[in-house]
């Protein structure tokens, strides 16, 4: 792979990542509802989720989802339902619950990491996008695995930077509103965004798959 081809790929990935999807909405929602420190839990989850989705795509899962309307619909609805579930949970939280030991355990970084991973890895649009997009940057007469490694590492790295910036921006905005009422509004705003993301994901058609 030439440097020029890699730069083209990196620019294309940056453009794609700049368009907010379910993963970005999840990260922003957590940052709005719980603060920008959630970025340190959700960003690694996004990275692992993208790595999983890309690996599955290159192994053939993307082709299966492209060919099977049933498989696409099942994965899409599971991911959409999970987003709605997380949104409802966040919407119903009260500011004082954040200080409660039991609630703090529910919102511990490991759970945020897991939520970010599941939402990212279960995005069928992403899997299909990877199988259609990444092979265009493969040089046929060169070893495939080193090229896959570079392409996956580039996308995952850019995805981490992208969601980190979103999380820090949303978290900074939340820092300006520290009253319990404002925190409740922020939490409900984040929950509403997740519910909307879930509904939009459920309505996506297979023919229009994109990240």
Image (cartoon, rainbow, N blue to C red):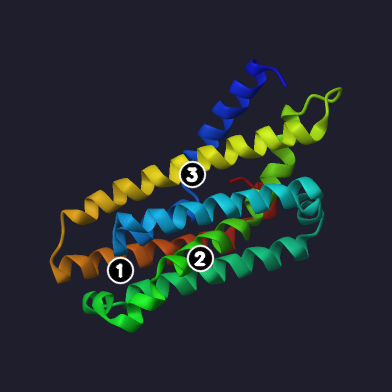
Location of residue 87 in the rendering, given as x and y in whole percent from the top left corner: 42, 70
Residue at x 81% of width, y 55% of height? 64
Residue at x 22% of width, y 74% of height? 95
First in sequence, mark 3 or 1: give its number: 3
Residue in the foreground of this view, choosing between 116 and 104:
104
Marks 2/1: CA distance?
18 Å
Q: Quadrant for residue 38, please give it.
A: bottom left
The residue beneath circle 3 is 160
Residue at x 44% of width, y 46% of height? 163
The residue beneath circle 1 is 188
Location of residue 66 in the rendering, given as x and y in whole percent from the top left corner: 77, 52
Marks 3/1: CA distance?
25 Å
Q: How many marks?
A: 3
First in sequence, mark 2 or 1: give its number: 2
First in sequence, mark 3 or 2: give its number: 2
In the image, residue 210 above or below residue 176: above
In the image, residue 173 above or below residue 196: above
Disc ID at residue 180: none
Instruction: Give the mark toward the camera: 2 or 1.
Output: 2
Toward the bottom, the furthest residue is 102
The residue beneath circle 2 is 115
Toward the right, the furthest residue is 141
Residue in the foreground of this view, choosing between 25 and 210:
25
Disc 3 + disc 1, Cβ < 8 Å = no
State left or right for residue 98 relative to residue 146: left
Q: Secondary structure at mark 3?
A: helix
């Amino acid at each position: 792979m030439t440097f020029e081809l890699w730069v083209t790929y990196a620019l294309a990935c940056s453009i794609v990542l700049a368009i907010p999807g379910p993963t970005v909405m999840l990260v922003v929602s957590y940052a709005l509802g719980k603060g920008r420190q959630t970025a340190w839990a959700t960003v690694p989850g996004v990275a692992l989720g993208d790595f999983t989705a890309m690996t599955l795509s290159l192994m053939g899962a993307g082709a299966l989802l492209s060919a099977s309307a049933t498989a696409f619909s099942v994965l899409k609805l599971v991911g959409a339902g999970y987003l709605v579930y997380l949104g409802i949970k966040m919407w119903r939280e009260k500011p004082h619950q954040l200080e409660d030991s039991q609630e703090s355990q529910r919102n511990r970084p490991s759970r945020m990491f897991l939520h970010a991973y599941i939402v990212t890895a279960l995005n069928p649009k992403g899997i299909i996008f990877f199988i259609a997009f990444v092979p265009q940057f493969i040089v046929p007469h060169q070893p495939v695995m080193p090229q896959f490694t570079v392409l996956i590492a580039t996308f995952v790295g850019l995805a981490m930077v992208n969601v980190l910036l979103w999380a820090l921006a949303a978290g900074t905005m939340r820092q300006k509103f520290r009253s319990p009422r404002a925190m409740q509004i922020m939490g409900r705003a984040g929950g509403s965004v997740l519910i909307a993301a879930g509904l939009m994901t459920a309505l996506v058609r297979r023919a229009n798959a994109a990240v």
